[in-house]
Each structure stands twice: as C-alpha cells, then as structure tokens.
Amino acid sequence: MNDDYTPDSPSRAEIDALPGVTLLEFGTGWCGHCRAAQPLIGAALAQAPAVRHLKIEDGPGRRLGRSFRVKLWPTLIVLREGREIARLVRPDDPHELAEILHRPPSPTQSA
C-alpha cells in the first residue's frame, strides 16, 4: 500500500491504458476521512497483492480527479484494463472494498 498521496498524477490516457486491476484512491493527507479509511484500505489491499494502488492527491485544479468526477474524499475507483468497474466514496465497510477488488470480470469485459 502506498503511504502518501502523490501530487504528480498520471494523465487520464495513462490511467486508461493500465493493464490488470488498479485501485485509484483520490484524497489528501490532511483529510480526516482519508486518514480514517487507511486501515480499511490497507487491509483490503493486503488480501489483493496483484492490485496496483495509485494514491493521488486531489483538489482544485487537479485534472485527473475532475475527469473521474470526484467530489468527496476519499474516493476509491477500481479499474480493470483501464475501465471503471466499481467506486466507493468514503468507504467504511472492509468487506465491500475486498469484494470489489476481487470481483471477477463481467461477461462483457475481457480478463
């Protein structure tokens, strides 16, 4: 699990081209909701070692967060092959996050 939110976010095109499963976590280091969610996120990621975790600082003027229509922090977006498959805003249920990280591809998605 990444510890810090990176201020240098990749471009949307780079995100859309990522292979496999990726968890995008949008937030800030000073956000109380973000800090409170860290144990839950860490526990879920410990059970999903193949999931790429990108912890991205969000705020005014941050294009990547706007491209995903992030409004509240933390917002967790699960991508498979660069396509959004699930989203959690201010997660508080470790089982829900674990479930979406392990969700099998739908029949319309390629694995």
Image (spheres, helix red, strand yellow):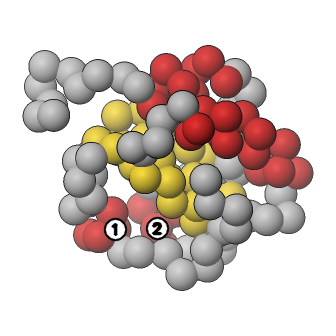
Q: Which of the image's four quarters has the C terminus?
A: top left
Secondary element at tag 2: helix
Tell me: 48 left or right of 74: left
Tell me: 25 left or right of 48: right
| Along the viewing direction, whichever of 106 and 2 lies nearer the viewer | 2
What residue is pinned by disc 1? 12
**Residue 79: numbered disc:** none
Residue depicted at x 13% and y 19%: 107
Q: Position of residue 32 (x, y in %)?
A: 88, 51
Mark 2–mark 1 distance (CA, rounded to whole Å): 6 Å
Residue depicted at x 46% and y 42%: 49
User: Tag 2: Cα neighbours inside 10 Å, few (<14), some, or many (≥20)?
Assistant: many
Would you say residue 89 is visible in this rendering?
A: no
Q: Position of residue 24 (x, y in %)?
A: 49, 53
2 and 1 marks in contact (CB < 8 Å): yes
- Quarter holding residue 30: bottom right
**Residue flagged by tag 1: what amino acid is it?**
Arg
Residue depicted at x 66% and y 68%: 5
Secondary element at tag 1: helix
**Residue 64: numbered disc:** 2
Would you say residue 32 is visible in this rendering?
A: yes
Q: Position of residue 34 (x, y in %)?
A: 77, 50
Q: Position of residue 69 (x, y in %)?
A: 49, 53
Tell me: 47 left or right of 83: right
**Residue flagged by tag 2: what amino acid is it?**
Leu
